[in-house]
Image (tube, rainbow, N blue to C red):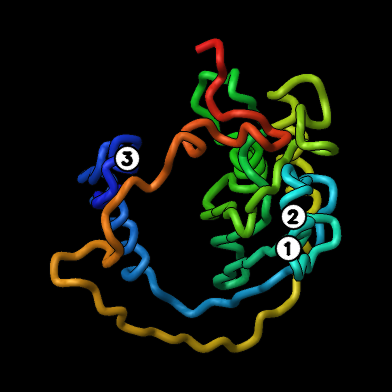
Amino acid sequence: MQDTRYKMYNTTNGGLRQHTLAAVVAAVEQALAELAPGRLVLSQGELHDASVNRSPQAFERNPDRGHPDGIDPATTLLRLEREGRVVGVVNCFATHGTSLTNRNLLISGDNKGYRARLGGRGAVGAAFAQTNAGDVSPNVPNATQGPTDDEVENARVIGERQLVGRAGPGPVGRRGGRRAAVPQPAGGGSAMPVGMPVGSAGRAGCPLSSSGPGIPRNL
C-alpha cells in the first residue's frame, strides 16, 4: 500500500494502491462507529514444535542469546469479548510463512493462513500476526524440508500446531493508552538518505541458511 522513496521496494508492490488505502480507511471508520464497552482477555504460553533457527551459527555469535534453543517459543492470544461473546482475536507467534518451498507458484497464506482458516471462522474478526521471527523457520526439525516430505502437508501441520499451542485464558485487567506525535520531514516519507535497500544477497533470499535461496534456480 505504501509508496516509499525506495525504488526497489516500490518495484515489488507497485507503489501506492488507492483501493487498498480506501479499504483501510473504511475499516477504521467502521471500527470507530462500532466503539462499545468490552472485555480483553490475554493468554500466553509456549510452543516448541513449530519453529527452528535456520542460522544457528550466526545466532551463536550473539553475546546475549536470551533463548537457548535459538527460537522464541512464546505464543500470545488477545481476545476481545463484548456482551459475553467473542468478537475478535489476535494471535502472535514467531515463525516464518515458509512451509511452502520456492517451488510453489501459487498464492498462499502458508502455515499462518491455514491457522487463520482453522481459528478465524464465523463473525469473529481474527488476525494471526508475526512477531520476532528473525531467522526462525517453520521447517522443523532442521530448517530444511519440514516435518513431512509434502510442503502442503507441512503448512497444514505447522498451522495446526499453532492452533493447538494457543495459550489458556487470563484476564488482562485495566490498561492505559499512550499517544505521541512523531515529527516527519516536510516532504513526508523517511528522513534517511535514499539508496538501494537490498543488494544481491537480498534478491537471492537466504542461500547461506538451511532454508536455501529465495528464487529457485530452475525458473
Which circle marks residue 59 in the picture?
2
Which circle marks residue 35 in the picture?
none
- In this picture, residue 216 sits left or right of residue 149: left
- In this picture, residue 32 sits left or right of residue 95: left
Label 3's element? helix
User: In the rendered image, which residue does mark 1 sit on?
Assistant: 62
- Is label 1 in contact with label 2 (beta carbons under 8 Å)? yes
Which circle marks residue 8 in the picture?
3
Question: Mark 3 vs mark 2: which is more N-terminal?
Answer: 3
- Give the class, few, some or many, for how many residues have Cα within 10 Å of label 1's Cα (few <14, many ≥20): few
- Is label 1 in contact with label 3 (beta carbons under 8 Å)? no
Name the residue at 42% across, 43% down.
198
Say what amino acid the circle numbered 3 marks: Met
- Is label 3 in contact with label 2 (beta carbons under 8 Å)? no
Separation (CA) of disc 3 from disc 2: 28 Å
Say what amino acid the circle numbered 2 marks: Phe
Name the residue at 50% across, 12% down.
219
Across and down, in percent, residue 13 comes to 33, 38
Separation (CA) of disc 1 from disc 3: 30 Å
Q: Is residue 125 above or below residue 98?
A: below
Q: Is residue 192 above or below residue 117?
A: below
Toward the viewer: 125 or 82? 125
